[in-house]
Image: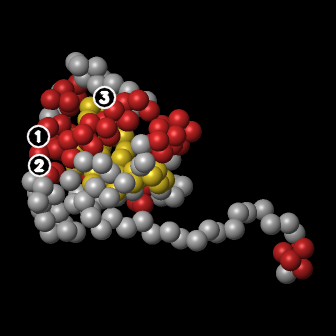
Amino acid sequence: MTCRKNKAINYSPVGKFKLIEANEPLKMISVDIFRPVTRTDQGNMKLIVIMDVFTKFTKLYPVAKSAMNDCSEAINQFMSEYGKVKVILTDRALTFTSPKWKQYWNEKGVRIRLTSVYTPQSNPVETRMKVIGDCLRIYCPSEHHKWDEHFLRIELWLNETEHIVTLRLPYS
């Protein structure tokens, strides 16, 4: 016990837990990048997945890369169709932790929140990503290079199925 008292602290003190609530539509969206890996005939390799945390409404955007510009463009397209969001919640991928990313959204008046390190379950869109993966395996069992031909069907199904938590359709 004496050693423990006298040794220097080699860890960061735990910060206060901050709960970010989404109590209205478009208050917070959760964003992540799904990597089907197989390049499609159109050159797409990834899906940017955007989910409204309150309603669970989900949009999918196929892209060739997941650079900051691609993600920003997808979110801007989402906001132009559905309205401005207040908070963007992402994991700690390099795309989402760059100073340029933070500055870009700060200038637009949108707050950036990051999930805890090594806890993918703290990003609500992760559950949707599992379902998207299952759907892609069902729709494209042998033609993996055509996954981007099915994303609209998957998106429609996600948004027209009653959510197990909200017991509502994301569209409503």
Residue found farthest to the bottom: 1
Residue 157 - label: 2
- The spot of residue 122 in percent (x, y) is 42, 60
- How far is the residue under mark 2 from the one under mark 1? 6 Å
Q: Which residue is mark 1?
A: 153
Question: Residue 122 versus residue 171: which sits nearer the camera?
Answer: 171
66 relative position to 59: left or right: right
- The spot of residue 98 in percent (x, y) is 54, 38
Of labels 1 and 3, earlier in sequence is 3
The quarter of the picture where residue 70 lies is top left
Label 2 Cα crowd, 10 Å radius (few <14 / some 14-19 / many 20+):
few
Q: Is residue 86 above or below residue 49?
A: below
Label 2 SS: helix
41 relative position to 87: left or right: left
Q: Which residue is mark 3?
A: 63
Type of amino acid at the residue the image marks with label 2: Trp
Label 3 SS: strand
Residue lying at 41% horizontally and 49% vertically, measured from the top left = 110
Type of amino acid at the residue the image marks with label 3: Val
Type of amino acid at the residue the image marks with label 1: Arg
- The spot of residue 172 in percent (x, y) is 11, 60
